[in-house]
Image (cartoon, rainbow, N blue to C red):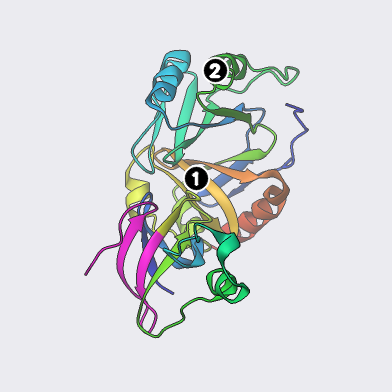
Amino acid sequence: MFVINCPYCGEREQSEFKAGGEAHIVRPKQPTELSDDQWAEYLFMRKNIKGVQFERWVHTHGCRKWFNMVRDTSNDEIKAVYKMGEKPPTK
Amino acid sequence: MLNYSNVITKENSYSGIQMKEIRPVMKLIIRGKKREFLSAIGKSLNLLLPTEANTSSSSEKLTALWLSPDEWLVYSNEISNPDNNNYETENLLNKNISKVNLGAVTDVTDQFVLINIKGDKIFDLFETGSPFNFNDFRRKKGSTTQTILAKIDVIIHNQNQNEVNLFVRRSFSQHLFSWMSDSASRL
């Protein structure tokens, strides 16, 4: 269990949130030109690394807004939280 | 707009806590982002919507709670006529907001049940079943939050010292009320 700083509501407990998978996956511009393997790569393959990961989260039981989060999956340390559409922090 | 009969017929009181349902109270969810939307609401209701997170604003007749950056809950301070399914405020907003595509106005009068809780042990009760930190909340009159209580989504409005309005979805209301009664009896 950990506390997440929702960019809209402030600090709330993790149980109010839901994780939404990896962030910043770009939909291919011309899906028709892709092979099945490439399409499957885009559609299904997600990173699941031990370490710093960029993720999408939603504040389900609060403001119901989606946002991005940089989280270290090994110790649940949250490095940064930023709104949808904002550029991910470089450091 | 159906105005169902009340779900919670009892009025329970324990040491430091009294709770009861208040009805019928008009409740509207309004959504919109544009600046014109905010000013149109302000003009129609004579009430400025709170833009700061977790706050509320109120006028003589209405109270507006901040739910999210583009969503508010507006409810009437006074009980409305039980035989009347038509709300002046809603009609006014439909005309000034929905019809001109500034935002959305939804009547949630029958979706949410308003439970009024009074007493000096309100927050002791909430602490038994909510992950929310009520320390700042209880000190600030008018603060608002959406959180979980006994695994149920609730909207809580700190109306006054030792008085809180709690909104819960109708289908959960009886269960929540009996859970709160049980919890309050053990404080």
The residue mark sitting in front, 1 or 2, is: 2
Q: Which residue is drawn at the image coordinates 39% and 19% (left, top)?
A: B39
Location of residue B61 in the rendering, given as x and y in whole percent from the top left corner: 49, 19
> Which residue does the numbered mark 1 point to in the structure image?
B156
Distance between the alpha carbons at the discs numbered 1 and 2: 31 Å
> Which residue does the numbered mark 2 point to in the structure image?
B100
Any magenta on residue B115? no
Q: Is residue A26 visible?
A: yes
Rendering quarter of residue B23: top right
Which element is circle 1 on? strand
Residue in the foreground of this view, choosing between B80 and A28: A28
Q: Is residue B43 left or right of residue B183?
A: left
Q: Which residue is drawn at the image coordinates 68% and 48% (left, top)?
A: B173
Q: Which residue is drawn at the image coordinates 52% and 45% (left, top)?
A: B155
Q: Is residue B59 visible?
A: no
In the image, which residues are magenta? A68-91
**Chain containing mark 2:** B
Which element is circle 2 on? loop
Residue in the foreground of this view, choosing between B162 and A47: A47
Residue in the foreground of this view, choosing between B78 and B118: B78
